Amino acid sequence: METATRERTGLTRAERYFFDVNGYVLLEGIFSPAECGRLIDLADRMDADDGCAYKHDGYPKTPALTILSRCAWYHPHLLETAMHPVLFPIMQDVVGGDVRLEEHQYLINYPVGPEKDKEFHECRVADEGWHRGIAPNVGSFEANGHYHCMFTKAFIYLTDNGPGEGTWVVPGSHRMDMPTGTLREFMDGTVARQLESRAGDVLILTETLIHAGPRLVAGARPRYSLVYGYTAPFMQTWNRYDPPADLLERVTPEQRSLLTGELRYAFRRGRF
């Protein structure tokens, strides 16, 4: 596998502090242009492959979004990328120990049609698709002065995200038990932030953080991202995300452990 475009061993102290406080951190230049191109080519191949029966199961296509789900089952490089030598240790750190691969999917966002453009520009920040994947009171913990979330994602941006095209976040909401609906009641531009990024950047985001995807204006280029979600090994697998038996027969022992979470309650082993 191609290595990262710059050497790093985990988060810097500043990045870890930023993550603890805000619930996310954007890492710049992790993947090279060549690697981004290869991952886009794999997305297009998977999208066009009528023999892939599981890619839309539970995630039907819409005019604004294509989700290519369970992509780490589709091609060996996509499973290798889930264990990227730069990203994987970071994900273990922020989750808090050994991890299982819960979510793995491509997101391809498309611009709205011209007939929807006026409606798009009149949309309020509060009307974005705000959500979180797990509540702070059951999904996170503090250890050694750092915040850990037992369901954390790596968003690998494969295309640039300019103004109006980035992921929406509510900094600090990962520590607040406030329901998303309550937050919407007073949501405005002072509470939320939309992140701009370049192809090859990676957003590390806790699923306790309230966030939303973008809606692209008419004429924008499609937005490609590759998302991996990591959980503690003992957490229950999503419906339809148990890896197929034939895949488990041909992967490495380390990949099998990642896919199945077979360590179970050895999470943070040696500390209890």
Image (tube, rainbow, N blue to C red):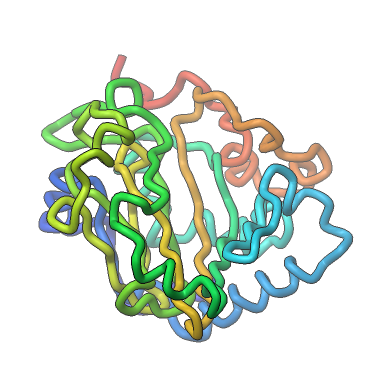
Q: Is residue 167 above or below residue 44?
A: above
Left or right of residue 84, residue 75 in this image: right
Looking at the figure, which quarter contains the N terminus?
Answer: bottom right
> Of residues 78 and 126, which is closer to you in this image?
126
> Of residues 166 and 117, which is closer to you in this image?
117
Left or right of residue 155, residue 108 in this image: right
Q: Residue at x 29, y 56 (%)?
A: 125
Instruction: Please provide percent x and percent y for residue 271.
Output: 29, 20
Residue occupying the far top of the picture = 272
Instruction: Please provide percent x and percent y for residue 222.
Output: 54, 77
Q: Residue at x 36, y 71 (%)?
A: 121
Instruction: Please provide percent x and percent y for residue 24.
Output: 26, 51
Q: Residue at x 33, y 79 (%)?
A: 162
Residue 249 position by quadrant = top right
Instruction: Please provide percent x and percent y for residue 114.
Output: 53, 80
Q: Is residue 59 above or below residue 119?
A: above
Q: Residue at x 77, y 49 (%)?
A: 54
Residue 173 position by quadrant = top left
> Of residues 20 and 47, which is closer to you in this image?
47
> Of residues 119 and 173, which is closer to you in this image?
119
Residue 27 position by quadrant = bottom left
